[in-house]
Amino acid sequence: MNFNIRGENITITPALREYVEKKIGNIERYFDSTPTSDVRVNMSVYNDEQRIEVTIPMPNLLLRAEESHTDMYAAIDLVSNKLERQIRKHKTKVNRKFRQMDNAPSFVFTDNDKDADNGQDDEIEVVRTKRFDLKPMDAEEAILQMNMLGHNFFVFVNAETNQTNVVYARKDGKYGLIEAQ
């Protein structure tokens, strides 16, 4: 794995870089072969909040996690644990799916992970389905609709591009826009 570590309002020391590479690199144990992907790590400090965001694009899987803490090393531990939970959950889902299909997955997880199931049922269950017509609008109108409904995201058709977009409320109080490629 190739690490791309950036810092905002923080200097990335060799000790910090080594700790990130060690903790995030631990996810390699979940795979039969070492994944060849770029690990994008963004560390930032604002006021007393230390934040780390990690994105690992892989074939058929995008791992992404972010955590905040007053101590950067603790935030790194938390984000590492979150990534491992995502992998275990995906591993359980993939293994269950391919047992049912009696087929081999396109990438293989190792079976020596003792924490893979933890006795927990990680089955994803859809409990409600909504259907509605998407009205063409701009992002500002979609944000107003989202706020009026009291939701933290809103799906709409962008009037300019005629594509389905999503606006969402961010933790920092600002808004994000997701556009399909």
Image (cartoon, helix red, strand yellow):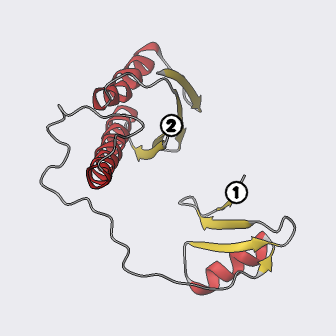
Residue bearing the label numbered 2: 59
**Three-letter amino acid code of the residue under disc 1:** Ala
**Three-letter amino acid code of the residue under disc 2:** Pro
x and y percentages locating residue 77 in the rendered image? 32, 36
Under circle 2, the secondary element is loop
In space, the residues marked 2 and 1 are separated at their CA atoms by 18 Å
Q: What residue appears at the point 37 percent right and 37 percent down from the top-left corner?
A: 71
As drawn, which residue projects farthest toward the right?
Answer: 160
Whether residue 161 sits left or right of residue 168 in the image: it is right
Residue bearing the label numbered 1: 180
x and y percentages locating residue 70 in the rendered image? 39, 42
x and y percentages locating residue 163 in the rendered image? 77, 66
Q: Residues within 10 Å of mark 2 (few under 14, many from 20)?
A: few
Whether residue 89 sits left or right of residue 57 in the image: it is left
Question: What is the quadrant of residue 172 in the picture?
Answer: bottom right
Position of residue 45 relative to residue 158, above or below, is above
Q: Pick the residue in front: 163 or 170.
A: 163
Chain-order first, disc 2 or disc 1: 2
